[in-house]
Image (cartoon, helix red, strand yellow):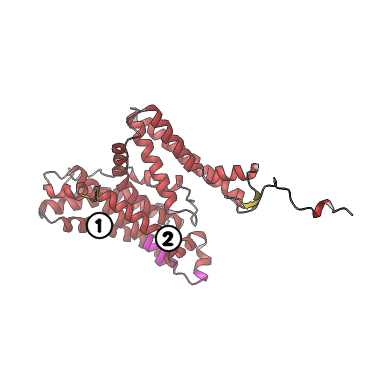
Amino acid sequence: MTTPVDAQPPGPSAAPIVASPTTGEPVKLFSRQWISDTLLRYSMVIIVLMVIAYFSYRSARFATPDNLITILVAAAPFALIALGQTLVILTGGIDLSVGSVIAVSAMAGAATAKANPGQVWMTVTVAMAVGLAFGCINGVLVSRINVPPFIATLGTLTAGSGVAYVIGGGAPINGLPAEFGSIANTKILGLQIPVLLMIIGIVALAVIMKRTSYGMRVYAVGGNRNAAEIAGINAKNVLFSVYAFSGLLAGLSGVMLASRVISGPPNLGQGYELDAIAAVVIGGASLMGGRGSIWGTVLGLFMIMTLNNGLDILVVPAYWQDVIKGVLIVAAVAVDVWSSRRRT
C-alpha cells in the first residue's frame, strides 16, 4: 500500500511558512517574495548602513567617537521638533510653523536672559511657554475652527517670523550672559543637556505611543477620524494636543539652539520644518496619517544628520546636499505608496 503524494509530510528541506514582514501574509522563508518584502521593510536601515560604510571608506574622520558625538549634538534640536512633527503627521496633519516658532522662542528666551542675568530656568520657561502658545494657536485653528493644517501652520509660520524680528527690533540679540550658554553646553554624565533631552524624549514618547491609550487615540484619529469619533474618541482634543506638543518642543529646541551660539538670531530655525518633515517621512510615516513610529522618525533623523555630517566632511556644496535630501524625500514617499498598494 502506498501513501498518496499529497499526504506525505514535507521533506527536511522544505522552507517553513512565515508572515511577510510587509504584508503579513504567509510566505515561504527565503522565498523571492519573502526577500523582496524584507528588503522593502528594512530598506531605510540598509540605506543608513550603506551610507555609513561609504563615508567611513571615504574619510577616516567619519567613523570616530568624536564625530559620533558631533552628530548627536547636531541632531538633538532637530530630534525635538521631529518628535512633535511625528505626532502631527500621525493625525494626518502637518506643522509648517516649527521653524518660526524656534526663532520667536529663541528671541524671547534671549531677551529674558539679557533682562534677567543668571535666571536660567526663567529663560527656558519663557521660551517653552512661547512655543506652547504658538502650538495652542495652531491647535485651535485646526481642531476647533477646522482650518486645514497646511493653511493654519503656514499662517503662524509667517506671523512667527515677523514676531521674532519685532522682539529684537529687526536685529539679533547679542551680549547675553555666560549663563545663557550653559543651557546647551553643560554636560551631565558626559553628555550635553540637549543630547540627554533627546534620548529621554525619544524613549518616553516611544513608550507613550506604543503602550498608552493616548497613543492609540492619535493613531485612530489619523487612520479614520470619523470612525474614531464613533468609537468615543474626542478627535478635537487629540488634534489640539499634538499641535500644542509640537509647539512646546519647538520652543525648547529654539532656546537650545540659541544657547549653543549664545545669541538670539531672528532667522534661527529657517527651513528646519522641512528637515523635520523629511525625517518623519523618510522614517516611514504616511502623510495620510495613521501609520508611522517614533523609532522610524529617529532612523530618518539620523539618516539626514549622517548625510549632512558626511557630506560636510567630504566638502560637498550645500546646494547638492539639498538635492540629495529632496531625492530622499521623494523616494521615501514613493516607497510608502508602493508598500501601501501591496498591503491592500
Q: Give the residue displayed 28% in from the left and 59% down from the top.
A: 132
* Camera-nearest residue between 120 and 38: 38
Say left or right for 2 vs 98: right
Q: Which mark is residue 234?
A: none
- Residue 267 is situated, as x and y percent measured from the top left of the image, at 25, 43
Say left or right for 188 vs 5: left
User: What's drawn in magenta, residue-wise?
Assistant: 229-242
Instruction: Examine the image and state in which quarter residue 268 appears.
Output: top left
The tag earlier along the polypeptide, 1 or 2, is: 1
The residue under label 1 is 128
Q: Secondary structure at mark 1?
A: helix
Amino acid type at circle 1 is Met
Assess whether residue 240 is covered by the magenta stretch: yes
- Residue 208 is situated, as x and y percent measured from the top left of the image, at 40, 62
The residue under label 2 is 209
- Residue 296 is situated, as x and y percent measured from the top left of the image, at 44, 49
Assess whether residue 93 is covered by the magenta stretch: no
Q: Secondary structure at mark 2?
A: helix
Q: Give the residue displayed 29% in from the left and 39% down from the top.
A: 70
Quadrant of the rendering where the N terminus is positioned: bottom right
Amino acid type at circle 2 is Met
* Camera-nearest residue between 74 and 10: 10
Outermost residue, bottom side: 232
Outermost residue, right side: 1
Q: Is residue 162 visible?
A: no
Outermost residue, front side: 1
Say left or right for 194 vs 144: left
